[in-house]
Amino acid sequence: MLDSNLQATLDGVLARNPGEPEFHQAVHEVFDSLSLVQERHPEYNDMGILTRLCEPERQIIFRVPWVDDRGEVQVNRGFRVEFNSALGPYKGGLRFRSNVNLGIVKFLGFEQIFKNSLTGLPIGGGKGGSDFDPAGKSDGEVMRFCQSFMSELYRHIGEYTDVPAGDIGVGAREIGYLFGQYKRLTNKYETVLTGKGLDWGGSLVRTEATGYGATIFAQEMLSARGTSLEGRRVSVSGSGNVAIYAIEKVHQLGGIAITASDSTGYVVDEDGIDLELLKQIKEVERGRISTYAERRGGRSRFVAGGSVWDVPVDVALPCATQNELHEKHAKTLVENGVIAVSEGANMPSTPTAVEIFQEAGIAYGPGKAANAGGVATSALEMQQNASRDTWSFEYTEGRLTDIMKGIHQNTLETAEEFGRPGNYVVGANVAGFRKVADAMIAFGVI
């Protein structure tokens, strides 16, 4: 139960933002952790921190017209929500997917505030995207859309203002087209996007960072309980960038990742996912996950539809999308003996699923902590660009590992400080919030 001040603030946020369920869910989840903080720090309430924190500093919605290969004019909608810059320039990805709307972008941007705060790096929170779906489009169509999208977005971003990155539907191809148009329009070669190609300002480890980070966080949670990933069966949802490199890091740490999925179903490979085959199908051929089982043979199988969470495992890494893991999935995982869940996606577990994990006493790492490796390495890319330098893979991965270990330690200690030992949700929310709140107080009411 929230205290009266928090409840009144939450009611005001929900009333002010109707029809945005994902944003409501993200806000509610943070508020649930902050009652003890409000008791200890009444100045946060006096300065209206939560009310201000839930209202983006800037919301940009714009038309994106482009011409398809048939010569027909198409129109999509573009978004950029610059949520909070108390700790640094806005930082957060661009998502191109047909279901993108303002509520989803706001939920992602709100989560990004706390995630970026937890990294300890000087970056604020933002997010953007479009209801354009690159799937099934030609390279020419994707290029024309990206150029039109950037023709408006370039007015609102910059090295010291807002530095977007990629997200679902925005990979190296899209970042290249976006950066090329920005450079064309501004005549500036600056750090305005991260996730760039290695030959033109990108950082090693950025591709791997989110999946690696979520797996490292899982390893740290297990280590805090006196065990590790060594020999553990691991389920991974998704088969995109995050999932692929979560699988890779699981294997490096001695675990056995046995699943991957896409919208058509999932594969189970009892011998462990063949990473090179998965990369060939998903990264090179852009094929469906069912092809994996056809080529792999052996003890692999494809399951059409269904849930990847039905497979008995020790550790689960949700790496697909928001609210993919529901109450019944959480119950199944717990009944099958799962001991840890580390979120590689943003808010992939529903609130009820999270409650089930916590009541069962398993180690549960929320996305804002567990998948912060991606944005952390984006910030490291910004550092390299600013110094006109390039770091080795080993050095950058070492920095990423140190950041993830630091996030784990910070969340664990904060949960202990506020009387919720082992509760990574409370630890992440409170630790991320306090840093941003203190900076906002220092700046005055702006």
Image (tube, helix red, strand yellow):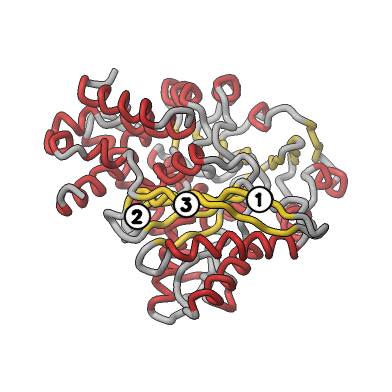
In primary-sequence order, the first of circles 2 and 1 is 1
| Residue at point 55%, 65% (across, down) | 151
Amino acid, disc 1 = Val
In primary-sequence order, the first of circles 3 and 1 is 1
Pick the residue in front: 211 or 184: 184
Q: Nearer the viewer, mark 2 or mark 3?
A: 3
Q: In the rendered image, is residue 255 in sight? A: yes
Amino acid, disc 3 = Arg
Using residue 312 as the reference point, say whether residue 141 is left or right of it. Answer: right
| Residue at point 81%, 39% (across, down) | 299
Residue 407 % position (x, y): 36, 49
Residue 63 % position (x, y): 57, 52
Q: Nearer the viewer, mark 2 or mark 1?
A: 1
- To which quarter of the image does residue 380 belong? bottom left
Secondary structure found at label 2: strand
Q: Which of the image's four quarters has the N terminus?
A: top left
Residue 62 % position (x, y): 52, 52
Say how many tags the image has.
3
> How crowded is the residue under tag 3: few (<14 C-alpha within 10 Å), some, or many (20+)?
many
Amino acid, disc 2 = Gly
| Residue at point 56%, 76% (across, down) | 184
Disc 2 target residue? 124
Disc 3 target residue? 80
Q: In the rendered image, is residue 422 in sight? A: no
Pick the residue in front: 434 or 317: 434
For the residues labelled 3 and 1, say whether their Cβ atoms are less than 8 Å apart.
no
In primary-sequence order, the first of circles 2 and 3 is 3
Which mark identifies residue 75? Answer: 1
Secondary structure found at label 3: strand
